[in-house]
Image (spheres, helix red, strand yellow):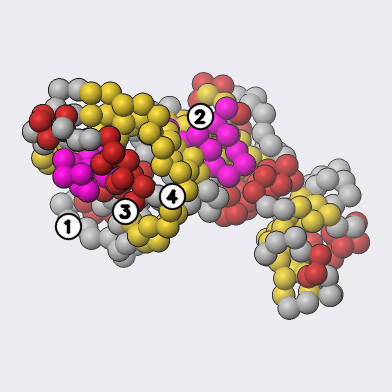
Amino acid sequence: MASPGILLVDKPGGLTSHDVVARVRRAFGTRKVGHAGTLDPMATGLLVIGIEGATRLLTFIVGADKTYEATIRLGQSTTTDDAEGEILASAGPDEVSGLPGERIAWEIARLTGPISQVPSAVSAIKVDGRRAYDRVRAGEDVQLAAREVTVSRFEVLAVREGDGYRDLDVVVDCSSGTYIRALARDLGAALGVGGHLTALRRARVGGFDVAEAVEIEALAGAPTLAPADAAARVLPVLDVTADEARDLRHGKRLSGQAVRLPARQAAAIDPGRALVGIVEARGADLKSAMNMPEEAR
């Protein structure tokens, strides 16, 4: 049986996140594999994969903030807000070439910070039990509710002029749940010329970086992060004694120990540097929100 751990994969374009999970299952010889956050087939970059008991950590990783590198094309809007959709409208070449850089910077600034964002209709959000993109492909008109997200950085790295369009290479730091396609769509709409995404790469998820990730062809024998090491990248660590670890694993509370918590939740790690689980306060007590299967010694 595969050992529990977190695997970092650099997803190539053209594969779904589910495709990657299927390949990891074959490479590690286990069905118990999941991921922390879907990437569209067009997108590349970091996919955080949980194997065996480490899948329990994914719910604490999926909400981490993220960094994306993307290319936004100004001058065209599409049905999917990215290059895989059909072109809905195109601006005149003079409209695009005449856009002053200061105006673009102003509209980008308005899309930075806490914002209310309507996700793309072809997102993976479920509507009455079905993915929004499935409903769109079935010909349904999907209207998604706006959600509050935070874009802490939206920076233009390079600009390229084309025939009737302008491409912006950008980097975005954002909270979980932010749609970069929606940023491209909204920027183009605010500028009056339309916009969509032509490239997207996820560079970071919380404390995990794509520079550490393995290529899809190198899954067999790929190194994984131990659950304790992975948990320490997304949560503060709380060291517990062997007796405390035993009690937590048995579902017991640690009476009066909530004062030791460094944050709302923490990764409890035993003297052998194994992850006991994720703990949180219950009144004045400390209680497990999630317990890991005990590691064989």
Residue occupied by mark 1: 141
Q: Residue 215, percent across and down? A: 53, 24
| Helix, strand or loop status at disc 2 | strand
Front residue of this view, candidates 227 and 174: 174
Residue name at image x 43 percent, y 53 percent = 113
**Disc 1 residue type?**
Asp
Looking at the image, residue 225 sits to the left or right of residue 16; the answer is: right
| Helix, strand or loop status at disc 1 | loop
| Pair 2/4: label in front | 4
Residue occupied by mark 4: 151
Label 3, label 4: how far apart the Cα atoms are? 14 Å
Residue occupied by mark 3: 119
Total numbered circles: 4
Q: Residue 209, percent across and down? A: 58, 34
Label 2, label 4: how far apart the Cα atoms are? 23 Å
User: Residue 10 got which mark?
Assistant: 2
Label 1, label 2: how far apart the Cα atoms are? 34 Å
